[in-house]
Amino acid sequence: MSNTNLKLNEINELATKILLKYGCDNENASAVANVIEAAEAAGCHSHGLMRLPGYVATLKSGKVNGKARPTIENLAPAVVKVNGHNGFAPYALQQGRSHLIAAANKCGIAVMSLVGIHHFAALWTEVEPIANAGLVGFACTSYKPAVIPAGGTKALYGTNPIAFGWPRKDNPPMVFDQASSVMARGEVMLAAREGHTLPDGVGVDINGTPSNDPNEVLKGALLAFGGHKGSSIAMMVELLAGGLIGESFSFEAAVRDNADGGPPQGGELMIAIDPSLLGDADNWSDHSEKLFHKIKEQKDARLPSDRRHKNRIESNRSGVMVADILLDKISTL
């Protein structure tokens, strides 16, 4: 498969230009393009330019308002609610983030619910700014049914990712982002595009038969990681990002979605914690570094975000290799 090298600013400009063409205003286009650029820079290609046609599909179908203006409401000193008014999640998150951080700095812990948004990005891009502000961060969101509950036979849960960020004094924050499924759906899509087979145990075809063909798994369903343990985490996300904040469960989102190929409307929950206000104000950071050091003492062990930070440095220096088959698809837009 042939590739083309693009600089990060070229990726951002390409995404911005296309989003503006199909109905985004400058603020929404910039917020989405920044997320796409960040994903490509970090080597998270399944959430980078590959997602651009899906964003465009929702604008073309009218499902998403590319000029939406989020509204922010403080329901309590430590509770922030952001209504995206049927817009893309990046701009709603961008507008609500400072309110969440301020509430956590004041109360020690704060929560932000996001409703009326269309989420299509990697969660680490949303938790990392919280950790960069010196706070512990957590986020979760649901999708459309893609994962079979433990013991079941039909997809019910979304891939339902969770992300967790931990601030560090002299290093980039530690952030992990993982789906509740064995593999993120975006990674399966990437495997399908590149013609790769999947490992055993990732998913099943439309008849419920285990399959290593990503195209068949995309028609069928994914399996939760760790069996009933991952299934329970997926259920937790449904409750936190749906039932708790008055948004849709994955199966409800699917019913009202127009299946245009882009993200459905749904919700997201974010939590921020100020470690300086939770019992060990003078020592929490140095104490935590001892754990990180012990992890990295072991051969081949690394912190979850190490590879991402390394990729980012290289991408800023040398650009990113983008598959020509993807660029050809984008060029038709």
Image (tube, rainbow, N blue to C red):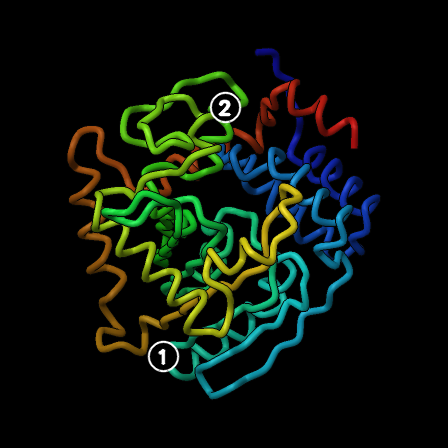
10 Å crowding of disc 2: few (<14), some (14-19), many (20+): some
10 Å crowding of disc 1: few (<14), some (14-19), many (20+): some
The amino acid beneath tag 2 is Ala
Compared to 91, does 227 lie above or below? above
Give the number of the mark in front: 2 or 1: 2
Specify whether 180 is left or right of 74.
left
Instruction: Specify the quadrant of the image occupied by residue 36.
Output: top right
Along the line of sight, which residue is nearer the eye, 200 or 71? 200
Specify whether 110 is left or right of 55.
left
x and y percent of residue 130 in the render?
A: 46, 62
Q: Which mark is residue 108?
A: 1
Instruction: Specify the quadrant of the image occupied by residue 319.
Output: top right
- The secondary structure type at the circle numbered 1 is loop
The amino acid beneath tag 1 is Gly
x and y percent of residue 193 in the render?
A: 54, 22
- The secondary structure type at the circle numbered 2 is helix
Residue with the mark numbered 2: 192
x and y percent of residue 84 in the render?
A: 64, 67
